[in-house]
């Protein structure tokens, strides 16, 4: 899919940390020549603090409020690829909000793959645990129902970017044809 119009619905990539949301999102945005936004990076920039600092100083609840504000109001309504934080779709009402704003696709990977991809990442506050693999497994089990509800699922284990880009483009084209944006008051535009 070459250069979708800037009036096309946003593509939101959901999923657990380490599933490839940011890396794939950047590649897709570059390929489509549209803006890429990493939600966590945008929150860090807006609040002049890293995600670990927000978690440590203000707590996860404060971070989730900042994340919700970004998803509701902090980015363009069209023409972007947005990589979401791993817990974003676990918040009440966020899945429905994102479906009104664009196409939502959820990336999956196995716990071992996620562990290998995130090992040693100091900027992952939820993995600061004595046994990070066990923490990943527990969080995946807790979040899986939300991820499954979020959108079309794409498995990223052992796949190339070109393969993933082709699959996500097919899904996006199909879902974007069905998309009907809603105004802030909920009416179809």
Image (cartoon, grey):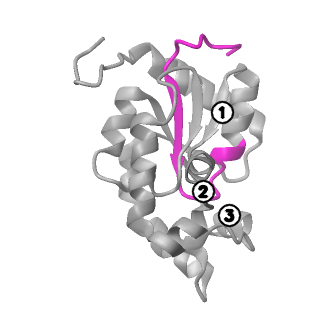
Q: Quadrant of residue 61?
A: bottom left
Q: Which residue is mark 2?
A: 109
- Does residue 151 sit above or below 29 in this rendering? below
Mark 1 sits on what residue?
36
Q: CA distance from mark 1 to mark 3?
A: 24 Å
Decide which of tag 1 and tag 3 comes sooner along the chain. Answer: 1
Task: Please give the name of the residue rendered at 62% of the width and 37% of the height, measured from the top-left corner.
Answer: 37
Residue at (53% x, 27% y) in the render: 171
Q: Is any atom of residue 27 visible in this view?
A: yes
Location of residue 81 (image quadrant): top right
Image coords of residue 18 (percent x, y): 64, 58
Q: Which residues are magenta?
A: 1-23
Magenta run includes residue 3: yes
186 vs 123: above or below: above
The image shows residue 15 at horizontal and vertical percentages of 52, 51
Relative depth, front residue between 51 and 84: 51
Camera sees residue 147: no
Q: Earlier in the sequence, mark 1 or mark 2?
A: 1
């Amino acid at each position: 899919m070459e250069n979708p119009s800037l009036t096309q619905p946003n593509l939101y990539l959901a999923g657990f940390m380490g599933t490839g949301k940011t890396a794939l999102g950047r590649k897709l945005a570059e390929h489509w020549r549209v803006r890429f936004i990493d939600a966590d990076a945008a929150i860090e920039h807006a609040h002049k603090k890293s995600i670990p600092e927000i978690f440590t100083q203000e707590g996860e609840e404060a971070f989730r409020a900042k994340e919700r504000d970004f998803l509701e109001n902090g980015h363009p309504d069209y023409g972007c690829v947005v990589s979401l934080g791993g817990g974003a779709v676990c918040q009440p009402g966020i899945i429905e909000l994102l479906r009104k704003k664009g196409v939502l696709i959820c990336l999956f990977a196995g716990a071992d793959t996620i562990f290998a991809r995130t090992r040693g990442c100091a900027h992952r506050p939820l993995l600061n645990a004595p046994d990070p693999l066990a923490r990943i497994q527990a969080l995946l089990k807790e979040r899986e129902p939300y991820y499954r509800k979020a959108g079309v699922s794409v498995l990223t284990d052992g796949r190339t970017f070109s393969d993933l880009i082709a699959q996500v483009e097919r899904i996006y084209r199909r879902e974007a044809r069905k998309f009907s944006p809603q105004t802030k008051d909920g009416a179809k535009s």
